[in-house]
Amino acid sequence: MNTSKAPSGAPENIKSRKLGMARDLQFLFFLLNASIYQKQRPNLYERLREYSNQAGALEVELHHVDSDSKDALDTYESKLNIWKAGLYEFLESML
């Protein structure tokens, strides 16, 4: 249920969604770059570095998404969610 006063496509909501996605990517980038992983298996560290690079590239791409276009943001968000699902699946496989 949307309790916001602004309609779901309002610019404020789009900017908030975009900021939320950027913060998610920044946090994941930070976690994936943690130096603690260097002491783990080399394959794990290298794979996490790949995901870290992808997170950085996705954040750059996000900054180019038109903030006035709900459709463009929806498309990007779908791509981001698919990427995050792959990352989480990989991380779960390492447990």
Image (tube, grey):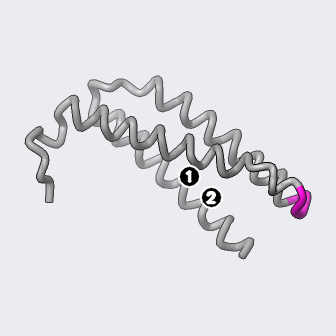
**The stretch drawn in magenta includes residue 40:** yes
Which residue matches tag 2? Answer: 87
Residue 27: image x %, image y %? 56, 46
Picture disc at residue 39: none
**The stretch drawn in magenta includes residue 81:** no
Q: Residue drawn at (51%, 54%), measured in percent from left and top? A: 82
Q: Nearer the viewer, residue 52 or 26?
A: 26
Q: Nearer the viewer, residue 23 or 87?
A: 23
Residues at circles 2 and 1 in contact by the CB criterion of under 8 Å: yes
Look at the numbered disc 1 and give the secondary structure of its residue: helix
Look at the numbered disc 2 and give the secondary structure of its residue: helix
Q: 10 Å neighbourhood of mark 1: few (<14), some, or many (≥20)?
A: some
Q: Nearer the viewer, residue 41 or 61?
A: 41
Q: For the view shown, which residue lies furthest in the bottom direction?
A: 95
Question: Which residues fall within the magenta stretch?
Answer: 39-43
Q: Residue drawn at (70%, 73%), measured in percent from left and top? A: 93
Residue 86: image x %, image y %? 60, 60
In the image, what residue type sits under mark 1?
Trp
